[in-house]
Amino acid sequence: MSRTITLDQVRVASPCSQPWEDMCGDAKVRFCDRCELRVFNLSEMTRDEAQSVLDAHPDRLCVCFRPTATGAPQTLDYQPQKVGRSMKWWYALGAAGAIAATAIEAIFFFGRPKPSPMPLIRGGISIQGKVAVPTMINPPPK
């Protein structure tokens, strides 16, 4: 039983190593001699055209596309989200806040007193390693 997927669900299961430029065809559809399938460039189609291709070939389909930020195919009618004037203000405010936080942290880090060096034991040699867990000679009765 074949199932149609939506354009937003399209992902490439196994990328093909055959270059698009080496295939015969036009900007929308080319033929791959290696896998003997038509390869559809979804990014050169409108959203409706691309969905029609998916509906017409539900079983075995090779596609080529530029992905959007979500990974879905970018079609001709794709409009990237534009950053408006108010969003630019928030980005600038966030950057200023990050710079201020970094400056404050630097003041506290470099201005704090330095810890005293580790005391030396046994004639100038320090000991370090895992702490041994003491064993009980007389365990408590149960």
Image (cartoon, helix red, strand yellow):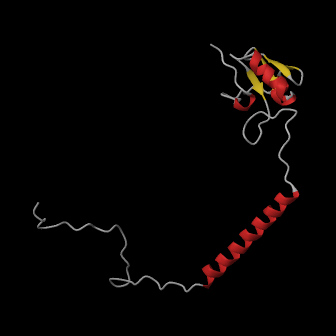
Give the farthest residue toward the right: 26
Q: Is residue 81 above or below residue 124?
A: above
Residue 15, percent from left and from top: 70, 29
Q: Is residue 39 visible?
A: no
Q: Is residue 80 above or below residue 99?
A: above
Residue 49, percent from left and from top: 84, 23
| Residue that appears at 86% across and 23% down | 28
| Residue that appears at 73% across and 19% down | 61
Q: Report whether 92 appears left or right of 100.
A: right
Q: Is residue 93 above or below residue 120?
A: above
> Between 103 and 90, which is closer to the camera in this rendering?
90
Residue 70, percent from left and from top: 72, 40
Q: Quadrant of residue 47?
A: top right
Q: Is residue 29 above or below residue 130?
A: above
Q: Report whether 48 appears left or right of 140.
A: right
Q: Is residue 13 visible?
A: yes
| Residue that appears at 83% across and 21% down | 23
Locate the N terminus and report the quarter of the image it occupies. Answer: top right
Locate the C terminus and report the quarter of the image it occupies. Answer: bottom left
- What number of labels is visible? 0
Residue 6, percent from left and from top: 72, 27
| Residue that appears at 75% across and 65% down | 94
